[in-house]
Amino acid sequence: MNEMNDYREMDARFYMQAFGRNLKLVKGAGSRVWDADGNEYIDCVAGIAVCSTGHCHPLVVNAICEQAHRLIHCSNLYYVPGQAECAKKLVEITGMAKAFFVNSGAEANEAAIKLARIATGRKKFVAFENGFHGRTMGSLAVTHKPAIREPFEPLEPGCSFVPYGDLDALARVIGDDTAGVLIEPIQGEAGVIFPPEGFLAGVRELCDRHGALLIADEVQTGMGRTGSWLALQQADVAADIVSLAKGIASGFPMGAIVAREGLEFKRGEHGSTFAGGPLACAAALATIDVIEGLLPSIPEKARRFAAALADHDPRVRGLMIGITVGDDCPKVQEKCLSQGVLVNCAAHGNLRLVPPLTITDDEIDRVAGVINGALG
Ligand SMILES: Cc1ncc(COP(=O)(O)O)c(C=O)c1O
C-alpha cells in the first residue's frame, strides 16, 4: 500500500496530471488483469475496446517478439516487413480498396480528413453532436464535446454539428461544398448510443446527393467489436473512408484508414515516421487471425450478456454494451471494482462494457452478477 502511495506521489510529481486514476495494473492474461497489490479483476474496459484478443494473447506476443528479434524499425523510406500483408488483410475484411497506416484513432481521423479534403477539393465537414473523434487539433475540430474542444479554438474551421439520428438536420447543413460527413456507426464515448433504424443509409444517401464523402469512424466499433469486422457491414452501408485503431493490434499502438477504389494519398501527401512499422504490422496480422476465429462466437456472447443484464435495458451490439445509469454511474463503477470487475462510465451516466472478444461464458455470468448487484 505504501509502495502504491509512493508511486502516486512520483506520478503526481513527474507526470502531467491529465488523467484521473487510482489503480495500477501490472499484469494481464485473457480477460483478467491484476493490480499492484495482487487483486484480480475481469477487465470489461480492456484498454477501452483495445485489448480485443485479451491481454497478452500468446499468438500476438509471439508475433511481436519474433519480429522484434528481426527488425524493430526501418522507416517508410523502405518496404516495411508485414505492411503490405497487413494492408491486404484489412482490405479483404473491410471490402475497401486500399489502406494507409497511422498510430492512433485521432491520427486515423486526421488522415481521413486530409484525404477527403484532397479528394474533393472542399474544406467543410459535418459531424454529430456527442460524437468523439480524437484530441489532436484536426480530430478535435470534428469532435463535438464543447468542454474538450472550446479551450483550443480556433480550430480548423468549417465543421457543423447536427444531432445524431436527425436526417432532416443533416439535410439542412450538408451542401455541395461539404467534403465529408464523419460518423460513428455507434457512438462510443457518448455512451454506446445506437443510430435510429435507417439513419446510416440515410446519411449515405445525403452524401451521394451532394458528392460528400462518408467517413465512418470505426475506431471503437471496428475490428470485430460489434460481431462483424465493421459495424457498418451490419447496416449494409458502405463508407468512402473508414478509420480504425483501438482493437486493431491488441494494444500495440496502431491506426489505419481504408478507402474505397479511387481514393488514395499520392506521393508526399501524407506520412509518418512510425506508422505501419514492423512490430505494429506483426501485432495486427496476429490480431486479425485471432479475431477471425472469434467472430462466430460473438453473437452468442452478446445474447448471454443481454439476457443476464435484461433487468437494466442494456444496449448490446456484439461485445459493445451500454447501460444508462445516470448520476450514480461512478458509484456503480466503484462497486464493480470492489467486486473484481472493471467497467467504466462513458458520457451522460452510461456504463460501458467493451470486454476482450475472448471473454468466456463463466466470466460473462460473473460480470453480469456483479453489475446486477451494483445496480441493485
Ligand atoms: C470513435 C473514436 N474515434 C477516435 C478516437 C480517438 O482515438 P485515440 O485515442 O487512439 O486517438 C476514439 C477514442 O476513444 C474513439 O472512440
Image: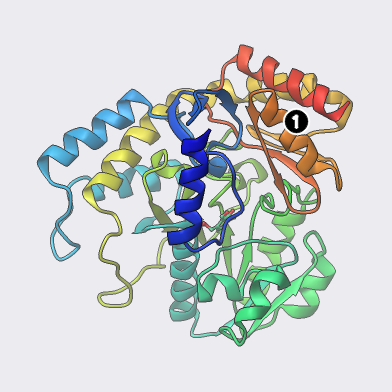
On screen, residue 230 above or below 169? above
Residue 264 position, x and y percent, is 37, 68
Residue at (32% x, 77% y) in the render: 269
Q: Quadrant of the C terminus?
A: top right
Disc 1 is placed on an element classified as helix
Residue 311 position, x and y percent, is 88, 25
Closer to the camera, 292 or 21? Answer: 21
Closer to the camera, 166 or 148? Answer: 148
Q: Is residue 219 visible?
A: yes
Residue 197 position, x and y percent, is 80, 48
Q: Is residue 49 left or right of residue 249?
A: right
Residue at (65% x, 19% y) in the render: 364
Residue identifier under label 1: 335
Name the colouring of the figure.
Answer: rainbow
Residue at (61% x, 17% y) in the render: 363
Closer to the camera, 256 or 149? Answer: 149
On screen, residue 289 above or below 88? above
Circle 1 crowding by C-alpha within 10 Å: few under 14, some 14–19, many from 20:
some
Q: Is residue 256 left or right of residue 232?
A: left
Q: Is residue 212 visible?
A: no
Furthest residue toward top = 362
Label 1 sits on what residue type? Lys
On screen, residue 93 above or below 373? below
Where's ligand 1: which quadrant? Answer: bottom right
Furthest residue toward left = 70
Residue 27 position, x and y percent, is 42, 29
Residue at (55% x, 23% y) in the render: 39
State the image quarter where residue 23 is shown.
top right
Closer to the camera, 320 or 172? Answer: 320
Q: Is residue 217 left or right of residue 310?
A: left
